[in-house]
Amino acid sequence: MTSALRLRDVHKTFGKTPIIRGVSLEVARGERHAIIGPNGAGKSTLFNLISGRFRPTSGSISLEGREIAGAESFHINRLGLSRSFQVTNLFAQMSVFENLRCGVLWSLGHRYDFWRDVDRLHDANEIAAEVLKQIQLTSRRDALAGVLTYAEQRALEIGITIASGAKIILLDEPTAGMSRSETARAVELIRAVSKGRTLLMVEHDMGVVFDLADRVSVLVYGRILATDAPARIEENPEVQAAYLGAD
Amino acid sequence: MGRAISRRWPWLAAASALAVLPHLPGLSTNFGRSLLSQMGIAALFALSYNVLLGQTGLLSFGHAVYFGLGGYVAMHLLRAVDGGLPVPVPLVPLAGALGGLFFGVLFGSVTTRRAHTVFALISLGIGELVYAATLMLPSFFGGEEGITANRSRGPRLFGLTFAPQIEVYFVIAAWVLLSAALLHRFTRTPVGRMCNAVRDNPERAEFVGYNTQRIRFIAFCVAATFAGLAGGLHALNYEIVASEAVSPARSGNVILMAFCGGTGNFIGPVLGAAVITWLQVSLSDYTSAWLLYLGIFFLALVLFAPGGLSAIVLSQAALLRTRAAGALLKGYSMALLPVMAMAAGVAMLIEMPYRMSTQPELGTRMRLFGHHWDAATPWPWLLALALIGAGLWLLRRAWPVVVAARQLGARSRD
């Protein structure tokens, strides 16, 4: 069986500074996989490499068996990988509904259509309304994304990420900066939306990680220290020394 | 059904207005109809520009390239019609649209590779390049004098010769209305919405599957096509196209129109084009310093009403529907006189030195606001300062009434 996502000896160097120093990682289909690690370990860089924002210096990245290292991000997205951002990244001057609808246009094949009225694209409107309900923003349907509260923006961020029906979703610190109750709601949302999909997430909140993840990889200084079930990771002395102990 | 009507009534209203306008007193003259034709052409040009600026977030300094080149292409077709080619004259502007599209594809494939500052600079470069080319290739462009044709020599259509201004006006009005409807439609399509997405956040747009470069390119071609159509209408209206049509000055003018009207809503550029065209035509009748006033008007808008005239109209209309309407009108009527006094004072301070330096042969005596003044005496200067001072003093008393009314209006809307 091919894994959903496979990284082989991926390196990324900025100038002369190596940030990712030989990462190999396999994420199985339907798995919820978390990447943890101290600040500056290269977690976001790793996400940027997988999603095509950066081009790896060397190594291979494959999505469902197809090589994607160095491909444009829109190509990778069209292959079924979608991502959220650590810093909220929305269409600020557009309504919440419009944000979600933009998220589904390509995957429904509307692509570069410059004739049909978007209000009459029933499939796009239905899915956008469905996702709107799922992320519990129905009452904010026509508000501009830029004026939402932080937690609402994070929810919308997840909404756009899943709207296209991507098979693999990457969530970059989805609960960062949230209150305890907001985090609990976000975890439920992530659990719900990741059903039937492969999830790879970067997360600082250990509660969230141990609650959600099937397996955890620990990234330290550009290398994967260990990959295992959450409970086993907690017991791993190497991990404790490098990361958990310091927390 | 009800929704379809509510969507269509603005267009029906616009069509009726376009039909009635050239028959209204003051506009039913040749001058009035020519002014309306000019406004229509400018409105379409500004609408096409807003596909770039307002909708896609691309600041172009060279949009006149597509207007002018479209105009040249249409003009060459009109010359061929003059020579006997059986093409109905009202269809000639379509050649302008095709010309705009052709050059949009040609130059757009280069400029839209990048966004932001680089895009703006490349557009500036292409603008200068094409302007220079019109002067260097006289066989096609006719040099500085441009090329001319006669629009009334084409095949007659329903007995129309298109020689009278009113007939050309209706050709222009029809094209502008149809184009505005198409451009409005474009904002509501998947690509139209993705233009907004690319404007707001190109990176996110890539992560929902779109090639942002392609979106920019499509927007650019649409903008160039309709700019070319406006250029074709320009050719038909004036029966001459010269290098001025592609000039950086015209590119600057369309930015002015879009900004003054407001880039944030569809109707803004139309409003801006109408007002700026009217100011350009009528102000120049009163004073040769009209460009200076236009500049002051533009600066004031950018500083105090960045949303443009359309945003002012919309926000005031909303306020006037609240219970603060009475208080607001009272505040504005209190502020009106002081503002007019200040404007008169400023105008005197501008006009007196301007006339003395540009027309020294006329001496220091001049006519301003229906009165004779001698700028060699201190009195007109003192009067101007007094007008500004008194206006300022009164305005400071009237303004709190306006502010309070606005706050009341904003509260009662929530």
Image (cartoon, coloured by chain):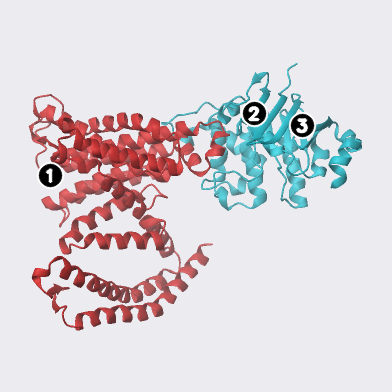
Tell me how far mark 3 sits from mark 1, CA to CA. Answer: 71 Å
Residues at marks 2 and 1 touching, judged by CB atoms closer than 8 Å: no
| Residue B344 pos. (x, y %) | 25, 73
Q: Mark 1 points at which residue?
A: B165
Residue at left 69%, top 29%? Answer: A11
> In the picture, which quadrant includes the N terminus of chain A?
top right
**Three-letter residue code for mark 2:** Thr
Question: x and y percent of residue A194 in the render?
Answer: 72, 33
Q: Give the side of residue B232 with respect to residue A237, left or right.
A: left
Q: Colour of chain B?
A: red
Whether discs 2 and 1 lie on one chain: the answer is no
Furthest residue toward front: A16
Instruction: Name the residue located 17 percent from the left edge and 40 percent from the top edge.
Output: B242
B334 relative to A135 in the view: left or right: left
Q: Are marks 3 and 1 in contact (CB under 8 Å)?
A: no
Same chain for labels 3 and 1? Say yes or no. no
Could you tell me which secondary element the residue under label 3 belongs to?
strand
Q: Residue sitting at 21 percent across and 31 percent down?
A: B73
Q: Name the residue under label 2.
A: A57
> Up-down: is B59 above or below A226?
below
Q: Mark 3 points at which residue?
A: A32
What's the residue at 34%, 55% (across, down)? B260
**What's under tag 3, amino acid-wise?**
Arg
Q: Distance between the residues labelled 2 and 3?
A: 27 Å
* Label 2: few (<14), some (14–19) or many (≥20) C-alpha neighbours in 10 Å: some
Q: In which quarter of the image is residue B294?
A: bottom left
Kindly identify the amino acid type of the residue bearing the numbered disc 1. Gln
* Mark in the foreground, 2 or 3: 2
**What element does badge 2 sit on?**
loop
Q: Nearer the viewer, mark 2 or mark 1?
A: 2
